[in-house]
Image (cartoon, rainbow, N blue to C red):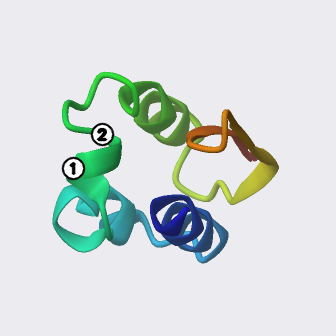
Amino acid sequence: MRFDEWLAQAIAQNDIQRLLNYRQLTPYALDNHPTEEHLLPFFVALGASGENARGKQLHSSYTYGVFSIAADAFD
């Protein structure tokens, strides 16, 4: 949950540098994403959104109490 909270806050603040350095800055980053392939689509969407895009969280929930089901958009 702390990882998701951190990610949502960085998205809302449009803090691209913080997002790009998530592995060093985020609590429990390596526990949540020991390899990067599950978070790479997020960065593809972020990069494709353009320089002035703003992020927002569309959905946040947990499956089985531990698997984050979050959806974000950039416009």
Horizontal and vertical percent position of residue 55: 68, 56
Q: Is residue 45 above or below residue 68?
A: above
Horizontal and vertical percent position of residue 67: 57, 36
Mark 2 burial class by Cα count in 10 Å: few <14, some 14-19, many 20+: few
Q: Nearer the viewer, residue 41 or 49?
A: 41
Mark carried by residue 33: 2
Residue that carries the numbered disc 1 in the rendered image: 30
Which residue is found at the position 49% from the left and 35% from the top?
42
Q: Nearer the viewer, residue 9 or 27?
A: 27
Give amino acid for label 2: His
Q: Is residue 8 above or below residue 72?
A: below
Horizontal and vertical percent position of residue 65: 66, 44
Q: Give the alpha-carbon distance from disc 2 to disc 1, as whole Å.
A: 5 Å
Q: Quadrant of residue 3?
A: bottom left
Q: Quadrant of residue 36?
A: top left
Mark carried by residue 73: none
Q: Is residue 65 left or right of residue 50?
A: right
Q: Is residue 34 above or below residue 60?
A: above
Q: Quadrant of residue 52?
A: bottom right
Give amino acid for label 1: Leu
**Which type of secondary structure does the marked residue at label 2 adopt?**
loop
Which residue is found at the position 29% from the left and 55% from the top?
29
Which residue is found at the position 27% from the left and 49% from the top?
31
Q: Dividing the image into 4 quarters, which one contains the N terminus?
A: bottom right
Q: Is residue 20 left or right of residue 67?
A: left
**Which type of secondary structure does the marked residue at label 1 adopt?**
helix
Do the residues bearing badges 2 and 1 touch, measured as CB atoms within 8 Å? Answer: yes
